[in-house]
Image (spheres, helix red, strand yellow):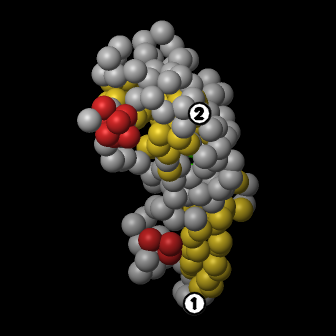
């Protein structure tokens, strides 16, 4: 019997399928569409049974259905302000902090770890490093604006469990982002040259 809310089957998320086995009639509870832990974590269904006899008899039971979270959400980077790096700053200076949000409902499905993408096309990988837990990004070199005016850094956020998404081959989910770092002249250096 559908209720008045999604949790009580208003949208016919669940349906009953009757199955006769010898002299017993079973009712299997089946799903009409995919369930999403991040939308609804539990349902309670009212099941009603009636007979077909001359004397109408009926009874009801409530079935609680509790979902288990699977790792189906990908960590997504939040938007950042424009970043700038000052030339001449010492190695190890913090330049920014990235943040990715994984909407999964439970740990470690929503645990996020940060990486600098280790590929040849990631031009910033030799110039910046990232704190895997906090997403803070630090310089690995002292920059000189006369050499190169800007750097692009590709970073990755990975979650903490094998993915439940199709074709994931047991790997965690991951999202990527490219951060542009234009180099700015150091103001104190400019003052000194006046
Ligand atoms: Ca989900
Ligand atoms: Ca996840
Ligand atoms: Ca999930």
Q: Mark 2 points at which residue?
A: 92
Q: Quadrant of residue 131?
A: top right
Q: Which residue is drawn at 57% across and 90% down?
A: 55
Name the foreground residue: 1 vs 83.
83
Question: What is the CA distance from the residue labelled 1 to the residue labelled 2?
Answer: 83 Å
Q: Which residue occupies the extreme left position in the image? A: 194
Name the foreground residue: 79 vs 189.
189
Is 159 placed above or below 104 here?
Answer: above
Q: Residue at x 41, y 81 (%)?
A: 4
In percent of width and height, residue 183 lies at: 34, 29
Q: Quick one: quadrant of the C terminus? A: top left
Q: How crowded is mark 2: few (under 14 residues within 10 Å), some or many (20 or more)?
A: some
In percent of width and height, residue 22 lies at: 73, 55
* Residue 145 numbered tag: none
Name the foreground residue: 49 vs 32.
32
Q: Is mark 1 on a helix, strand or loop?
A: loop
Label 1 vs label 2, nearer the camera: 2
Q: Which residue is drawn at 47% across and 39% down?
A: 95
In percent of width and height, residue 100 lies at: 49, 46
Name the foreground residue: 102 vs 28.
102
Q: Which residue occupies the extreme bottom position in the image? A: 55
Is 26 placed above or below 132 here?
Answer: below
Report whether 21 appears left or right of 181: right
Q: What element carries label 2?
A: loop
Q: In which quarter of the image is residue 148?
A: top left
Q: Name the residue under label 1.
A: 55
In percent of width and height, residue 14 lies at: 50, 61
Q: In which quarter of the image is residue 91?
A: top right
Q: Residue at x 65, y 28 (%)?
A: 170
Report whether 84 appears left or right of 167: left
């Amino acid at each position: 019997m559908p209720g008045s809310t999604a949790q009580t089957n208003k949208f016919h998320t669940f349906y009953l399928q009757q199955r006769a086995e010898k002299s017993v009639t079973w009712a299997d509870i089946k799903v009409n569409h995919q369930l999403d832990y991040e939308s609804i974590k539990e349902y309670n269904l009212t099941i009603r049974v009636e007979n077909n006899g001359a004397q109408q008899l009926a009874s009801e039971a409530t079935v609680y259905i509790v979902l288990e979270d699977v790792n189906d959400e990908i960590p997504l980077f939040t938007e950042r302000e424009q970043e700038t790096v000052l030339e001449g700053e010492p190695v190890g200076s913090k330049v920014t902090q990235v943040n990715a949000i994984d909407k999964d409902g439970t740990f470690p499905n929503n645990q996020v770890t940060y990486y600098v993408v280790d590929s040849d096309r990631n031009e910033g990988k030799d110039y910046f490093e990232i704190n895997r837990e906090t997403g803070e990004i630090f310089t690995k070199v002292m920059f000189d604006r006369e050499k190169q005016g800007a750097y692009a850094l590709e970073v990755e956020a990975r979650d903490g469990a094998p993915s439940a998404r199709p074709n994931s081959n047991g790997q965690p989910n991951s999202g990527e982002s490219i951060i542009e770092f234009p180099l700015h002249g150091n103001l104190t250096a400019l003052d000194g040259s006046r």
